[in-house]
Amino acid sequence: MSDRFTLAATDGAARVGVVHTAHGDVPTPAFMPVGTKATVKTVDPGELRALGTTILLGNTYHLHFRPGEDLIAELGGLHHFMAWDGPILTDSGGFQVFSLRDTIARVDDDGVTFRSVYDGAPARFTPESVARCQTQLGSDIAMCLDICPSVDVGRAAVEEAVRRTTLWATRQRAAPRAEGQLLFGIAQGASDPELRRRSIAEVTELDFDGYALGGLAIGEERPLMFETTAWAADLLPLEKPRYFMGIGDPEGVLEVIERGVDMFDCVLPTRTARTGSALTWEGRLNLRNATFARDARPLDEGCTCPACTRFTRAYIRHLVNQQELLGLRLLSLHNLRFLLELTANTRAAIEEGRFPSYKAEALDRLAAATV
Ligand SMILES: [Zn+2]
């Protein structure tokens, strides 16, 4: 058993545990709200805590360019800067670089050269530079720089991504980091059985504090993604936390937890909110729909969030239609609460050995007609 992770219970492949970080314990499974630019859009850190958030994600790419890691370090580090005293995980910035494909100038064994999405200025990330950036930010969990190939590339490109991801992980592991900062390795390999196995074998050999499955949820078919997750998670060490990068729809969350994933992140709750939609046990509600004009019910019966305990669907629909900021905020608060509560309930179900029935019932309810 690692002193950074305690595995407390299992139910099938599903797991309950605790990740121990410098800013506190994170019970798993854990959903990590995304604070791209040192803010979870429209939501105050105190509100995040009240909603049940135990760990936030920050995006190194964006913070590197605006306002810059040195400025954040000067102002006391990311926790102090954004007034969130709980655990923070920072990604490496690699995912943004490789998903903004048109901005890439060159990838070589040493790193990647690209143009900043903000002003087109030339920039370069190497394993050492992203380690330094995350050290300056002072996150509790840092991620390795990896190469996430897009879903439409051939096997040779995936193989090259696996090779460089290992090369870079080896170098980043040797780079200095913030005191107490955990470092997670990332396995690539898409859904290719041989390449994914190779990546997992090479990255776990380096002995990181936790492991992420990268290069999934990027547009491949969902059944293939879940199938890959099942056997790939099974190849990861039992005693280390496992992070699925980029999933946050309620159904997907239940599926990856069932396959042994401990942590996951997604912008979905807040992005969905900004399109005027609510995640509920009646399916996804589009508040712009005229159906809700006179609907005096809360977004979701039984939800204890600040939106559902005070406001009607009709009022929130009015706010959304008038592009009032409060509407987006209320939907963000609700959607975050929905996913955090779903995750907490899932944790309890695993602890009590009733995860399969909990999941089946939850999927049944979520499949109800979306309005
Ligand atoms: Zn609510």
Image: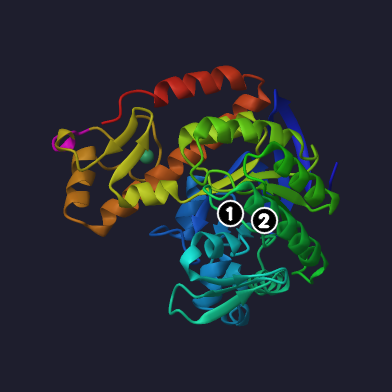
Residue 118 percent coordinates (x, y): 43, 75
The mark nearer the N terminus, 1 or 2, is 1
Q: Dot 1 lies on which element?
A: loop
Residue at figure coordinates x 84%, y 46% from the top left: 2
**Rendered position, 117 above or below 249:** below
The residue lying toward the viewer, choosing from 162 and 271, is 162
Q: How is the image coloured?
A: rainbow
Residue 295 falls within the magenta-colored stretch: yes
Disc 2 residue type (three-letter): Ala
Picture disc at residue 243: none
Q: Are marks 1 and 2 in contact (CB under 8 Å)?
A: yes
**Rendered position, 320 above or below 36:** above
Residue 302 percent coordinates (x, y): 38, 30
Residue 183 percent coordinates (x, y): 74, 58
Residue 140 falls within the magenta-colored stretch: no
Disc 1 residue type (three-letter): Pro
Quadrant in which the C terminus appears = top left
Where is mark 1, residue-wise? Answer: 149
Callout 2: 10 Å neighbours few (<14), some, many (20+)? many
Q: Dot 2 lies on which element?
A: helix
Q: Label 1 vs label 2: CA separation?
A: 7 Å
The residue lying toward the viewer, choosing from 80 and 222, is 222
Residue at figure coordinates x 21%, y 56% from the top left: 323
**Rendered position, 35 above or below 283:** below
Magenta stretch secondary structure, dominant: loop
Residue 256 vs residue 209: left or right?
left
The residue lying toward the viewer, choosing from 165 and 235, is 165
Label 1 beta carbon within 8 A of ligand 1? no
Where is mark 2, residue-wise? Answer: 161
Res. 7 in view: yes
Residue 84 vs residue 297: left or right?
right
Residue range (magenta): 292-296
